[in-house]
Amino acid sequence: MEPMDRDDRSLALVMWGDLFEDFFDTIEVSLETFRTELTGGWLFAYIRALALHGVTTSLISVSARVSAPHRFVHEPTGTSVTLLPAPRRHRWLRALYRRSRTRKSLSSLASYSSIPMRGLVRELRRCGAEAILTQEYEHARFDVLVGIGALLKLPVFATFQGGDAPNSRLERLVRPLTVRRCAGLIVGSGRERARVSASYRVPAERIGAIPNAMELPEPDASARLTARDALEIPADAIVVGWQGRVTIRRKGLDILLDAWEGVSRRHPDRDLLLLLVGTGEDADEFRRQIQRRGLDSIRWRDDYISDRAELLPYQAAADVFVLPSRHEGFPVAPIEAMALGLPVVAADAPGVGDIFADGEASGGIVVLREDPGALAAALERLIVDSDLRRELGVRARDRVERNYAVDAVGAQLRSFMFGDASAIGS
């Protein structure tokens, strides 16, 4: 991918979690799968968006499964990735807090100790980083990175993807200092921007109102039928799609099943399908909940699909996308669906109001969280009204084209991190 701007810059992006495996183990993505197949999500959209504007990103994480720095290239994007070995003190504290009742304070101490300081400094110098970006400021790792940035005279930024509260009293004491010393926060959610501004008194110029980026597929009128043929879904079925991490409470999957049960009972003569894709730590319980309802109108692929091309047929086969979440940061999945021209029914979780700022004019129907009746009613509106589905789908695609395309978001990210804003706090 050729950058548009020749004034190249270098960014180190420190990935989420104390350890690489903290997230990827829960979705059953191995290191080899990450290296050779994983695409999609905000992380790689950021990398592609920044590359379009001359910013080379290096990914850095920590792992308990390596004994020395392990470097490789992420094959789908050509991104350099480094896994640093977890310090012994982190492993000891991690084991201790798992056995202790004072879980939160020890959890924070374990997180503070998770970064191998000398190893990270060497890696930042090796990749020529001119700035540091990490996922979430409400995490102990962020506090440590702000300190390292001050030592190396590097600006430190953080992007909001859902972490909106300190983990412990210790973090509540430290966080105001580090938030005010960092170079800037990238926050797509208006609700979260208001919270950060009020809680930490961060000046408006240090908060970038920048959404997650989305690579837009070219419109393809035949994609829906092709996808349905591949998945053996009848052409005239009404398909409601969902994808994500299977964490029942956070993602509102219990609400979704309650709503879908009501929809299915009230429309027995319609060929309906709830098409689910994803896995996570609640997969076994989610399976039991599906089985208890005894519905044959649910199909679930219990798998984290790492290849965007493999996921695309599941998205393209849908008529409607549903997001029943109780909590989100700035969700990517509904934007991906909107890029395919799908209308969305979404609960009013954080970040959702920013995507559908104009309600149905933005391509979605937003309902109250924790309300299966409201979710069901909105789904039924779209199930029975093909003209409304079509009209909201057109609005959804237009909304994404105007606000979330990688080129536009990349320009905003580069300006915020390497323009005037990059000098703030450094």
Image (cartoon, grey):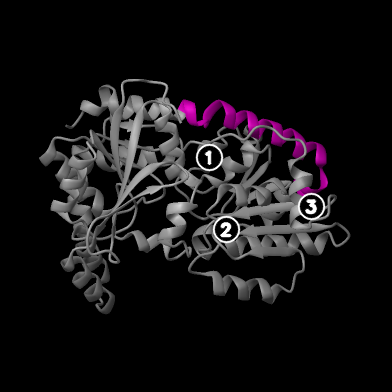
- Mark positioned earlier in the residue sequence (2 or 3): 3
Q: Which residue is mark 2?
A: 370
Q: Place residue 178 in its image quadrant.
A: top left
Q: Residues within 10 Å of mark 1 (few under 14, many from 20)?
A: some
The image position of residue 193, as x and y in percent, is 37, 38
Residue 344 locus on image (x, y percent): 65, 44
The residue tagged 1 is: 353
Residue 251 is tagged as: none
Query: Which amino acid, by three-letter code, is at mark 3?
Result: Asp
- The majority secondary structure of the magenta stretch comes to helix
Q: Residue at x 54, y 37 (%)?
A: 355
Segment colored magenta: 380-408
Tell which of 105 and 113 is nearer to you. Answer: 113
Q: Which amino acid, by three-letter code, is at mark 1?
A: Gly
Q: Amino acid at mark 2?
A: Glu
Q: CA distance from mark 3 to mark 1?
A: 35 Å
